[in-house]
Image (cartoon, grey):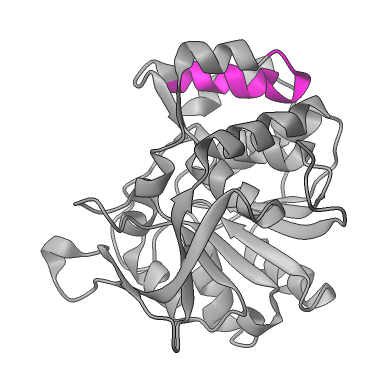
Amino acid sequence: MSSPTTSRTHVILDTDIGSNIDDAVCLAYLLAQPACDLLGITTVTGEPYLRAMLASSLCNAVDKDIPIYPGVEQPLMTPLRQAHAPQAMALANWKHDVDFPHGQAIAFLNHAIRAYPGEVMLLGTGPLTNIALLFATQPDIPQLLKGLILACGQYTLPGREWNVLNDPYAAAIVYRANVPIHRSVGFDISEQISTPAGEFRARCHLPHLHPVLDFAEVWFQHKETITFYSPLAAATIFDEQVATFTPGTINIELKDEELLGKTYWQPDGQEARHQLATNVNTQYFFEHFFEVFEA
C-alpha cells in the first residue's frame, strides 16, 4: 500500500507523552513518517520536563534533533488531575536530553507558526492548555495555521474524555477558535483500533519502536491493550483514507459542575466550524501505520 501523500507537511506536536502510551506511539509514527517535517514538540500537564525527556529519548533513538519545549503544567482554572508521567520510570534505559528551554513553549509555537503561515498542522494529543494560551494571547494565530488536529472529546459514549476533563476551560477556548481546518478525533471512535499487548510486542522489532515498547511495559502493568488514539489523529494528516470527517459544531460543557468538560457534537453542513471523525477504516489504518516503520 503506497501513501497518496508525496510532499512533506510541517507539523508541531503538543503532547502529554508519558501517561497513556498512545502519545509515545504517535511521536514514533511522526518521526518515521517520511511525509512529516516535525518542526518541534511541546509538552503539557504534570511533570512537563519529564515528558520532554521522554520525547527526547524517542528522537535520540532515531538520531533526529527536534526542538522540544516543556509547556504549562497547571490547568487554567481547575485542579491538576494528571500530576505525574509514569512512563518516566523507564527513562534510564534510553539516551535523552535533560536541559530544555524554560517557559518558552508558547513563544515557540507562536514563532514557528508565523515562520510558515498557512503551512503548519498543529497536532494536539493532550490537555489543551498550551494551545489555549497561544490562541488567547495571539488571537491571529488560529487563522495562520493550515489546520488543527486534536485527539480530543467523546461524542457517542457516556462520560467525559480525559484530555478535555484535564482542562475544560482551555478546551472551550480552543474550540471557539476560527481555524481553517479544525478537526477532532474522539476517544470513542479510536477504541475501534486497539491492539492486545502481545500483538503490539510482536510488531515492535523495528528500531523506532524499541523505546516505545519499553515505555509500553509500564502501561501494560495496568492495562493489557493499546488504543491508537493519538496515532489515529496523526495519521489523518497524511492519508485521507484513514478516516471520514463530518462537518458540525463541538461545544464544551462549562456551566454544569457535574458535567464539566463533557463534549457535545451537532452535525451541521451549513456553517460548521469543526470536523469530527465519524468513521475509521480500521484495517487500512493498521496497514498505513506499520508500513511507515518498514519503509
Q: Find residue 286 and report its horizontal and vertical position in percent.
A: 59, 32
Q: Find residue 35 and report its horizontal and vertical position in percent.
A: 82, 49
Q: Main secondary structure of the magenta part?
A: helix
The quarter holding residue 248 reads bottom left
Q: Find residue 209 and report its horizontal and vertical position in percent.
A: 68, 23
Mark count: 0
Quadrant of the image containing the N terminus? top right
Above or below 283: residue 131: below
Above or below 84: residue 224: above
Above or below 217: residue 241: below
Quadrant of the image containing the C terminus? top right
Q: Residue at x 75, y 28 (%)?
A: 293
Question: Range of the magenta residues?
Answer: 205-219
Question: Does residue 108 appear in this view?
Answer: no
Q: Residue at x 87, y 57 (%)?
A: 7
Question: Does residue 41 appear in this view?
Answer: yes
Camera-side residue: 243 or 161? Answer: 243
Q: Residue at x 32, y 55 (%)?
A: 154
Q: Residue at x 38, y 42 (%)?
A: 83
Camera-side residue: 106 or 22? Answer: 22
- In reply to whether residue 218 is colored magenta, the answer given is yes
Camera-side residue: 141 or 160? Answer: 160
- In reply to whether residue 29 is colored magenta, the answer given is no
Q: Find residue 4 and report its horizontal and vertical position in percent.
A: 78, 51
